[in-house]
């Protein structure tokens, strides 16, 4: 009896205290049954810190409710993490976004509270709740709407990890691949002869430069619209080095219209060095490697115009190309130039194949500088790539065989095996 | 033989000229290639045609911008016109600021064309059709509308109080809306599906670009959406269906675009066939 | 020593290795390195852009001075460039940013750049026709296959295809999802291996042509 | 509707026609449009660069956040100018070395991610004829990219199959793109006929 009375008094005091703060916020108990709903917080694993993830478990009956998550730090500052989440979404992350810089700081204790409601939460209510230093869990009424406050989570501290465990498969394969490369490098150093197959377009480089020289026309080398940080552009620059060496040997002229200024300066260095190596530094003219504009179609217009006026005898399109690929290649064709193209953009390859005399497809282009130089050290990396291809093929075949046993014959062991394999591949 | 030689040495400029004509002519003289309507398009059409009583409400979501306008604009026009023809009320809503301009353009166009071809049954802005004012918040807006549409927007896109508009009579929330057709090329479609359909049971149709269409097929299978218009083709099919009713005289943008597409494709194929014939004749002659 | 290739090659090696290591370490400062390096690239590129402008505008100034054949157009280019920059500066002063809706800078974008760009882009409709005309010849087995798939897919995308056979659009979808996808993946795998090869050759200093 | 009276629409329309005149042949109108586009876009690029880089990435961090780390790329950027002076021009290799190093370094893990994703996607999640074709296609295409083996005998045959797959893929991609490219021209025609000439409503 005494206990009940005390509880009643406590309840009254509490509701009065709530009441006195705000007319419409009323505390009720057990009007909105939410058994089985609780929220937990934990540091997000494998991240650089400043991130906490909040999970909740819930009975199906709450599927369609909304959840608002509030955060309190150890100094008593409250803030709203997220409002009106669908309960069925199970998780929210308290992390910094592009619009809002990091709000969670590493090493500070945070406590999270969830607010369950059947309707979306009222802005005014949110402001009232934010002001409170502590919310008792239970059911409340505000403007005739009931909502339920969960009990606070334990303290959560965010921390940065020193190693991303989910990337272990990548690390392992990186180590394997490093060994494969080093093995072949050693092989090359010890003097073993390494073979490289014929790559069609590349044998034509000499012919293209030669014919162009005979006709007294310049060569045009287009590096596409990539940056120096893009591998295809770098590959294009390495091919440029070999091509300009030929150009210097034939004593003709090479034009390199560029899209990115850093690519332009790098191309200038490359051509200058190639001319020097060929013993003709006097032929190098900085102004032949010029900047056009960093605008995709402005660049296409400029290069098209230049092609029409300079009438190059050979056009190289090597690098990163997007929609402008065919604009350039068709114009090149219409002036009757020999065209050797190459890119890694699979969407553009069909157009190059249709409009150019020779096309280096994807990896062929990456291997081109090796092919043109044929140094043992360079060749070794190609051999290593091939060995990795064998690995990949075996992996794919293994996956297929396992799936036959797993799905075709319905064998549980293989199903597990297949799941493991697939999981390992998900980075 | 002369012809074969001509084809073999064909100047590209002939190709350019004919292609340009193939595309321009359908604009000046619409051809109207025959077209089969597909079930996802037909089911939206049938729903508006048969399942909504007179005075019912169709909500159209205009969540696109000029970049996908070519495909989605014709959809907005034709669905709005269809709804008006059945004496339904049409509300446009947009979750993005650029969408407002798109929706206003559609409303202007549809009203003008409707009143031109149906002077005896004129439609009015504010009485039969309007645009709800843009309010920031995306998913919050979708959710609030489920509670109270008037409170969510207050005004229409032209600055009028919604509570004073005849078109809003009796509309409180999604319960009073018979069908929503969401037009977007982005994932905002999912926001509507999850919140408006998932939580409030709003009946929905989707209109999206040809590229995104594949992505949303699963929502048709799961019956979350009653139908879908995919790309220019979907819009053209709908125009075709509405055209059979002969009540609306507006320009059929999608059908014209589709005509231009079809004639261009046919031209491509003829070109390739001609090229091959010429190639083989020449090869045989040289072989002799 | 600075004049040799040693220092630059070491710098390449070092930055390359740091980038690789940071992939596995989310902790500061490694976790943010990718973002930081991209910012740095844009700053460096920004400075280099002045070299680019110097190259382009310089070339056209020379043409103008020499009264080259196309000097008038060089003048157009220089005026276009100067006017855009000047309008940009004036409107920045006027509105705080040149990208304000009322600014003439926006007009330049909407009525010069947009139509010019989109028209350049639309030239592709014509070029794709002439390329198809030329390339799609049944010269041999593979070329014939290329031609046939192209025609099937082309038809499957328009209503006409459905008129011919209702299976055509479905078959088109299948081609895109199965054989097309298979080859694309194969090429993609080759590309990522090739990129690894290029990267390793450069980081280890085997390929140094870019450094001259 | 009638022909547009809007000055700006006229400019856009005339420039559009000037570009199309290139399809006939190179001519002064195209040249005008071309040089203008290059000039304006580079001016526009500089303004964007000023706005996005100098202000937001250099000035603001330096002045407001006291982030002195941006001094490093600033210095690297300035080193690029060393090429104006013959005796120190070799210094410009340092920023280039940095940029290339960063690019290649970043590409190693991302190539891996791509590699894993491609292999993952090839794993047959269900057993049907399509999965088998995909496996055959992927493997034979990869064989085509073998460089250290001569393509004859068995390898040669498989790589032939690979080429066949590649050709089918190219044909399909080509055919698939035509529609999108034609749409671009339709868009311009709509602009010319409707916004400018007002021939169609």
Image: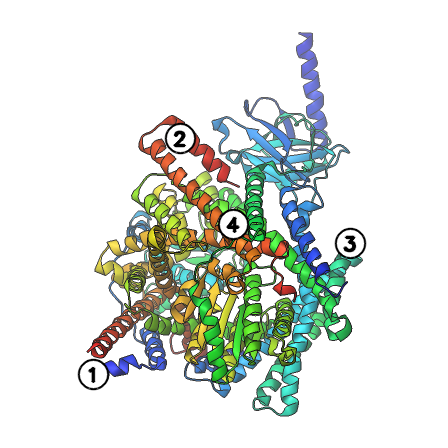
Q: Is residue A267 left or right of residue B58?
A: right
Q: Residue at x 56, y 91 (%)?
A: C69
Q: CA distance from mark 2 to mark 3?
A: 53 Å
Q: Which residue is mark 1?
A: B1
* Colouring mode (rainbow / by chain / secondary structure / one colour): rainbow
The secondary structure type at the circle numbered 1 is loop
Answer yes or no: are tags 2 and 3 on the same subunit: no
Count residues near mark 2 (Cα–Cα under 10 Å), then give few for <14, some for 14-19, many for 20+: some
Q: Are marks 3 and 4 in contact (CB under 8 Å)?
A: no
Q: Residue at x 69, y 72 (%)?
A: C50
What mark, if any, has residue A415 been given in the picture? 2
Answer yes or no: are tags 1 and 4 on the same subunit: no
- The image quadrant where one finds the C terminus of chain B is bottom left
The secondary structure type at the circle numbered 3 is loop
Q: Horizontal and vertical percent for residue B258?
A: 33, 65
Q: Nearer the viewer, residue B264 or A253?
A: A253
Q: CA distance from mark 2 to mark 4?
A: 33 Å
**Chain at numbered mark 2:** A
Q: Is residue B37 left or right of residue A260?
A: left
The secondary structure type at the circle numbered 4 is helix
Q: Horizontal and vertical percent for residue A108?
A: 74, 34
Q: Which residue is mark 4?
A: A384
What mark, if any, has residue D67 been given in the picture? 3
């Amino acid at each position: 009896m005494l206990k009940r009375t005390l509880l009643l008094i406590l309840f009254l005091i509490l509701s009065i205290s709530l009441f006195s703060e705000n007319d419409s916020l009323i505390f009720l108990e057990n009007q909105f049954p939410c058994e089985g709903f609780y929220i937990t917080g934990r540091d997000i694993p494998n991240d650089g810190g400043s991130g906490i993830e909040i999970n909740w478990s819930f009975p199906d009956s709450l599927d369609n409710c909304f959840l608002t998550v509030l955060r309190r730090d150890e100094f008593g500052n409250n803030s709203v993490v997220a409002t009106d989440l669908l309960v069925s979404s199970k998780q929210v992350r308290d992390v910094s976004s592009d619009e809002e810089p990091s709000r969670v700081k590493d090493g500070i204790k945070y406590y999270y509270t969830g607010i369950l409601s059947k309707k979306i939460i009222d802005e005014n209510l949110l402001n009232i709740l934010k002001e409170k230093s502590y919310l008792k869990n239970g059911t409340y009424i505000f403007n005739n709407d009931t909502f339920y406050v969960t009990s606070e989570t334990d303290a959560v501290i965010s921390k940065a990890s020193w190693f991303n465990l989910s990337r272990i498969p990548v690390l392992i394969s990186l180590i394997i691949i490093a060994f494969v490369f080093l093995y072949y490098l050693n092989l090359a150093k010890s003097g073993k002869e390494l073979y490289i197959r014929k790559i069609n377009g590349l044998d034509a480089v000499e012919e293209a430069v030669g014919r162009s020289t005979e006709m007294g026309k310049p060569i045009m080398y287009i590096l596409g619209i990539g940056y120096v940080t893009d591998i295809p552009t770098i590959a294009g620059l390495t091919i440029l080095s070999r091509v300009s060496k030929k150009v210097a040997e034939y004593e003709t002229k090479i034009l390199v219209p560029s899209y990115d200024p850093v690519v332009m300066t790098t191309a200038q260095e490359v051509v200058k060095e190639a001319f020097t190596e060929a013993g003709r530094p006097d032929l190098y003219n900085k102004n032949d490697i010029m900047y056009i504009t960093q605008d995709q179609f402005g660049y296409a217009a400029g290069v098209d115009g230049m092609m029409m006026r300079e009438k190059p005898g050979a056009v190289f399109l090597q690098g990163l190309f997007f929609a402008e690929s065919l604009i350039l290649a068709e114009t090149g064709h219409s002036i009757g130039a020999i065209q050797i193209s190459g890119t890694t953009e699979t969407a553009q390859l069909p157009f190059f194949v249709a409009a150019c005399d020779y096309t280096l497809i994807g990896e062929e282009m990456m291997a081109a500088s090796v092919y043109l130089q044929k140094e043992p050290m360079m060749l070794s990396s190609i051999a290593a790539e091939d060995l990795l291809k064998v690995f990949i093929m075996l992996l794919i075949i293994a996956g297929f065989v396992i799936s036959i046993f797993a799905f075709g014959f319905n064998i549980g062991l293989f199903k597990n095996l297949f799941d493991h394999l697939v999981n390992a591949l998900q980075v | 033989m002369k012809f074969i030689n001509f084809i073999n040495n064909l100047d590209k400029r002939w190709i350019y000229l004919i292609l340009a004509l193939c595309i321009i002519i359908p604009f000046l003289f619409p051809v109207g290639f025959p077209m089969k309507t597909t079930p996802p398009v037909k089911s939206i059409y049938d729903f508006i045609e048969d399942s909504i009583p007179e005075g019912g409400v169709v909500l159209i979501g205009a969540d696109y911008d000029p970049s996908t306008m070519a495909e989605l604009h014709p959809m907005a026009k034709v669905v709005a016109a269809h709804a008006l023809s059945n004496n339904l009320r049409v509300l446009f809503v947009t979750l993005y600021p650029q969408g407002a301009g798109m929706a206003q353009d559609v409303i202007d166009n549809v009203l003008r064309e409707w009143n031109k071809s149906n002077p005896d049954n004129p439609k009015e802005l504010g009485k039969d059709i309007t645009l709800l004012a843009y309010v920031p918040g995306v998913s919050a807006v979708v959710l609030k509308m489920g509670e109270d549409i008037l409170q969510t927007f207050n005004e229409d896109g032209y600055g009028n109080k919604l509570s004073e508009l005849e078109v809003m009579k009796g509309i409180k929330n999604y319960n009073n809306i018979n069908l929503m057709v969401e037009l977007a090329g982005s994932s905002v479609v999912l926001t509507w599906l999850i919140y408006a359909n998932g939580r409030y049971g709003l009946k929905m149709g989707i209109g999206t670009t040809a590229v995104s269409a594949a992505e949303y097929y699963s929502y048709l299978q799961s019956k979350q959406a009653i139908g879908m218009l995919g790309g220019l083709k979907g819009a053209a099919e709908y125009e075709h269906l509405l055209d059979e009713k002969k009540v609306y005289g507006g320009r059929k943008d999608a059908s014209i675009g589709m005509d231009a597409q079809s004639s261009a494709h046919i031209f491509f194929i003829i070109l390739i066939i001609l090229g091959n014939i010429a190639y083989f004749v020449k090869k045989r002659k040289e072989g002799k | 020593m600075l004049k040799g290739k040693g220092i630059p090659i070491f710098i390449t090696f070092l930055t390359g290795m740091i980038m690789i290591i940071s992939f596995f370490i989310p902790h500061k400062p490694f976790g943010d390195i990718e973002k930081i390096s991209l910012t740095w690239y844009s700053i460096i590129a920004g400075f280099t852009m002045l070299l680019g402008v110097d190259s382009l505008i310089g070339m056209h100034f020379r043409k103008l001075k020499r009264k080259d054949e196309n000097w008038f157009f060089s003048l157009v280019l220089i005026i276009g460039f100067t006017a855009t920059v000047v309008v940009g500066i004036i409107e920045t002063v006027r509105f705080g940013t040149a990208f304000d809706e009322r600014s003439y800078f926006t007009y330049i974008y909407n009525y010069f750049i947009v139509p010019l760009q989109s028209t350049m882009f639309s030239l592709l409709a014509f070029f794709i026709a002439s390329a198809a005309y030329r390339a799609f010849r049944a010269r041999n087995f593979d070329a014939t296959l290329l031609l046939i798939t192209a025609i099937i897919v082309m038809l499957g995308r328009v209503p006409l295809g459905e008129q011919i056979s209702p299976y055509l659009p479905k078959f088109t979808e299948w081609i895109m999802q199965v054989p097309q996808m298979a080859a694309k993946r194969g090429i993609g795998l080759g590309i990522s291996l090739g990129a690894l090869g290029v990267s390793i050759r450069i980081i280890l200093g085997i390929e140094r042509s870019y450094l001259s | 509707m009638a022909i547009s009276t809007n000055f700006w629409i006229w400019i856009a329309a005339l420039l559009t026609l000037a570009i199309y005149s290139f399809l006939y042949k190179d001519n002064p109108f195209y040249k005008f449009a071309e040089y203008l586009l290059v000039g304006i876009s580079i001016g526009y690029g500089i303004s964007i660069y000023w706005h996005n880089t100098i202000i937001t990435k250099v000035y603001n961090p330096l002045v407001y956040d006291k982030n002195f780390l941006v001094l490093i790329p600033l210095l690297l950027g300035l080193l690029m100018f060393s090429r104006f002076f013959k005796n120190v021009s070799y210094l410009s290799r340092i920023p280039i070395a940095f940029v290339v190093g960063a690019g290649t370094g970043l590409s190693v893990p991302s190539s891996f991610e791509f590699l894993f994703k491609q292999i993952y996607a090839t794993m047959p999640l269900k057993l049907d004829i399509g999965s088998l074709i995909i496996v055959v296609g992927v493997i034979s295409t990869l064989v085509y990219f073998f460089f250290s083996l001569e393509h004859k005998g068995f390898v040669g045959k498989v790589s032939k199959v690979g080429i066949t797959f590649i050709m089918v893929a190219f044909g399909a991609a080509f055919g698939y793109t035509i529609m999108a490219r034609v749409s671009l021209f339709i868009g311009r025609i709509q602009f010319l006929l409707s916004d400018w000439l007002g021939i169609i409503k």
